[in-house]
Amino acid sequence: MDFIPSPPLTPPHTAEDRINWLRLLRSRRVGTATFYRLMNDHGSAQASLDALPDIARAAGVNGYRICPKSVVEEELRAGRKIGARLLAIGEPEYPASLALIPDAPPLLWVKGDVSLFERPMVALVGARNASSLGLRMARAVSRDLGAEGFGIVSGMARGIDTAVHKAALDTGTIAVLGGGLDVIYPAENKDLYHQIADTGVIVSEQPLGMKPFARHFPMRNRIVSGMALATVVIEAAAKSGSLLTAGNAMEQGREVMAVPGHPFDGRSSGCNNLLRDGASLIRGARDVIDVLAQASPLALTAKQTPDEAIEPIAQTPQSLDDTTALHTEILSRLGGVAIAEDQLIRDLSARAEDVSSQIMTLELDGHITRKAGGLLSRT
């Protein structure tokens, strides 16, 4: 909290001011905390840039060079070329909830409908290797919250994140990227990326063209939780990035919620641990709205509760090229909680005869257990 601008920063008023902000933020060894500290100490981006070489020299860094003006001008041109905008903290369209966290990005690249930032937002996150039940829950909660006027925030990763975004395409979803705004990751989400850019918002604090590295994802996660009133974890192992997002939400003073799972399913251990430690238990969108209404009724401006009946949304068909791929996909969708075989077939979007044949093989091999009523679970 010690590097929150005090008094609050005045956003850049001219094109030159904006260039200087970006030059300062893109200079070597200047992260979010250092940016705010320099602005507090020197009063402006230009004065901070002038002081940087001497500060670096005093710290034992010789030959320090600030980011050249030509570099940030090229980044700004690239942003305009793809229809993106650079929002500065303090500007009216900058997400209000995000501006309240201590390490809010000073500058944020956005592409899409920024009016979504005016809605109350909920972050939905979870496992990349999600189960069939986890994906169904993700789609249902996302769809129902979106229908009630909430903006749905997630990180566009595989699994839960992808399901969440797809379910909220019609109502409005915000994807926070780990790399540059123009870098689609994972590549399989190319179509989803363009759909979100058309109907929702893509967000990133990284330079355009920056490929995502492991260190970028914790930085992205603080934005996911920071934009939202609450973070809901739908499936997460005991050590996962989703739990880091939940931890960020706690530190930011936001609500943390989790969907319970079977104790024998490792993908639910992180959620169960959150619930043990005090997170609110979530069974559907109604629970999310009820918790938010109790925590901050004045901040909750979305419509009232959705229908509690939650129906699964069909998943986009995927190509299952061979037996090994189908085996892997079937096992990845099953957990300790049994589900109906016909539901599994619908979730896989594969031919029923192919799935049934492989289920039998996996059952004979001892990987799948069949229970009363034709229900299947992973052994």
Image: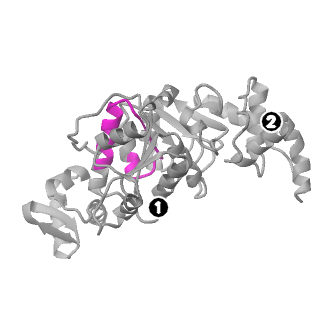
Dot 1 lies on which element?
loop
Left or right: 51, with 82 as reference point = right
Residue furthest to the bottom: 365
* Numbered label attached to residue 45: 2
Which residue is at 73% across, 29% downward? 10
Q: Amino acid at mark 1?
A: Ser
Left or right: 85, with 176 as reference point = right
Q: Is residue 211 magenta?
A: no
* Location of mark 1 (residue): 240
Q: How is the image coloured?
A: one colour
Which residue is at 55% across, 47% downward? 252
**Magenta region, residue range:** 137-162
On screen, residue 4 above or below 8: below
Q: Nearer the viewer, residue 154 or 251?
A: 251
Q: Nearer the viewer, residue 95 or 289?
A: 289
Disc with the residue nearer the chain's start (1 vs 2): 2
